[in-house]
Amino acid sequence: MSTEPTTEPTLPVDPGLAEHQGMWADALRAVAQGWRFRAKAGRLGEHSLVGVLHLASLFENAASLLDARGGTAGGSPRVTDGGAIEEELRQSEERFRLLVDSVLDYGIFILDPEGRVSTWNAGAERIKGWRAEEIIGRPFTLFYTPEALARAHPQEELKIATREGRYHEEGWRIRKDGSRFWADVTITALRDATGRLRGFAKVTRDLTERKRSEEALDAQRENFELLVQSVRDYAIFMLDPEGRIVSWNEGARRLKGYEAPEIIGQHFSRFYMEEDRKRGHPAEELEIAIREGRYREEGWRIRKDGSRFWADVTITALFKDGVLKGFAKVTRDLTDRMKQEQALQQANLDLERRVQERTAELQVVNAELESFSYSVSHDLRAPLRAISGFSRVLLEDYSAGQPLDEEGLRYLERISAGGQRMADLIDDLLKLSRVTRAPCRRVPVDLADLAREVVEGLSRQTPERAVRVTLTPTARALGDPHLLRQVLENLLGNAWKFTGRTPDPSIEFGTQEKNGERLFFVRDNGAGFDMAHAGKLFTAFHRLHEASDFEGTGIGLATVQRIIHRHGGRIWAESQPGQGATFWFTVAPHA
């Protein structure tokens, strides 16, 4: 705003001039001297608009009245009817006063140069609670808090307004009833044409509700920030639209290992595995979050120290008025849960394996039950038939009391042999039963030492035999020493037995590594067997050789298989008739 005369120079008239009673005289005098008021285009503050309009009205009314009554344009003015002009200006000022009094949202009043209230509008009464007759003539310091009065803040405001022309602030003010309200205050210095201070125009607006809303919002923001910072189980942080970190909570520090000053401003891709960064996975996550609003996944992430953790990650795109402002990223460490899931999965696999093992054992038991039924009906009954038959013959032939001859003695030998075979069968059946029920201890054991002891025992039983035996120096395993000894007693005993008719017998016990698995073997160059019958090899009571050729009950290999299976291993054989046999077995490392 400015006033421009038709001659030189310009008159310094403040817009607040119109708000003071009696300022119409200044307008009249200025116009009478040839000055004109012109409002230039520009931004007007909400508090100055009313005053500017009134000032313009004063100047325009004064100018029009002077012109109508013979005032000059450009030269020295001539006032032909001062009374009429004065009346017009008075009416204009009255209209302005009515306008100001009708404003209820703003307290608009005038202070004299000493700060005493000289005018008071309805808005001031509504905001501050004072009626005009109560407040006019009293100092404006009544509106200030004790804290402001203690530091002479009201006087400082007037000094600034006097020096700079205007003062503006927000702060607490006091109503008549002592209550406080948050005020937006503008004080404008009012000067006449000579520059003399005539007073101050003061405009006050009650912004208490806005202040409370701002404080509530600040409190809400502070509480939210406190909440985010207090969360320790979740890493919660913000990214800018390019993916750089702009905030960092305590949970993020604890989870990822970075302090806020060293990570803020860094790109969030540093938390990702190298292979994920190479294939552009971090950028892809942000693209999906922008497109769909949210992205979530589980995957490996990297801590500051380089260690990995399994993370649950959620990225939310943040928009305001359709413009991307950044991303909220929440990360949770699920490593323990993943380990539990893996442990559960492994437990399920172990359970499934054990079920399979148990099923296989039950199948073996069923097969053994069938064999046992066969044994009861054949193997055990055969010796009984021999005992019964020869006993009946003895009773018939020697019942008269005659002495036993050579044939009678032969009958008794047959009876004794049948009884011994029954005893052997029963003993082996008991051994097989005990193998099934006996506890299986898992301890480190050297099978080479057990094999050496077994061979020494066989040599003592048949010292007349010269068998070439080769034993590996060491064959370590994890298993039950007593049960594994039975395995070697049966396998080495069979090798010893089936090389009985071989001219140059040899037996070997050793180990071999194949596909990361340790294999144990017992090899001989004895009678061997036809692989076509290998399926019956480990079935109880099934023999591949006649008892007259090689003694035995047919239970030994069934016992061996049962022990190996209990150790989580496998057993199989390779052979050709007349060229010996090799028995292979394993013992599971985890057994």
Image: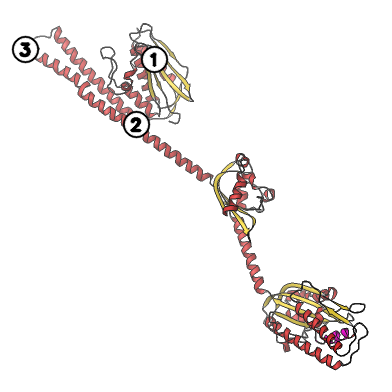
Q: In the depicted view, which residue is nearer to us: 89 or 471?
A: 89
The x and y percentages for residue 320 are 63, 60
Image quadrant holding the C terminus, namely: top left
* Image vertical order of residue 546 relative to residue 234, above or below: above
* Image vertical order of residue 256 relative to residue 112, above or below: above
The x and y percentages for residue 18 are 80, 82
Q: In the depicted view, which residue is nearer to us: 75 or 425?
A: 75
Secondary structure found at label 3: loop
| Amino acid type shown at disc 1 | Val
Q: Are marks 1 and 3 in contact (CB under 8 Å)?
A: no
Q: From the viewer's perspective, is 11 left or right of 455? A: right
User: How many residues crowd around disc 2 within 10 Å: few (fewer than 14), some, or many (20 or more)?
Assistant: few
Secondary structure found at label 1: helix
| Distance from the alpha carbon under mark 1 to that under mark 3 | 52 Å
Going from N to C along the chain, the mark reached first, 1 or 3, is 3
Residue at the top extreme, as displayed: 503
Q: Is residue 23 magenta?
A: yes
Q: From the viewer's perspective, is 77 left or right of 357? A: right
Residue 356 can be seen in this image: yes
Which residue is label 1 attached to?
A: 455
The boundaries of the magenta stretch are: 21-31
Going from N to C along the chain, the mark reached first, 2 or 1, is 2
* Image vertical order of residue 272 relative to residue 511, above or below: below
What colour scheme does the image use? secondary structure
Q: From the viewer's perspective, is 493 left or right of 152? A: left
Which residue is label 2 attached to?
A: 360
Which residue is label 3 attached to?
A: 400
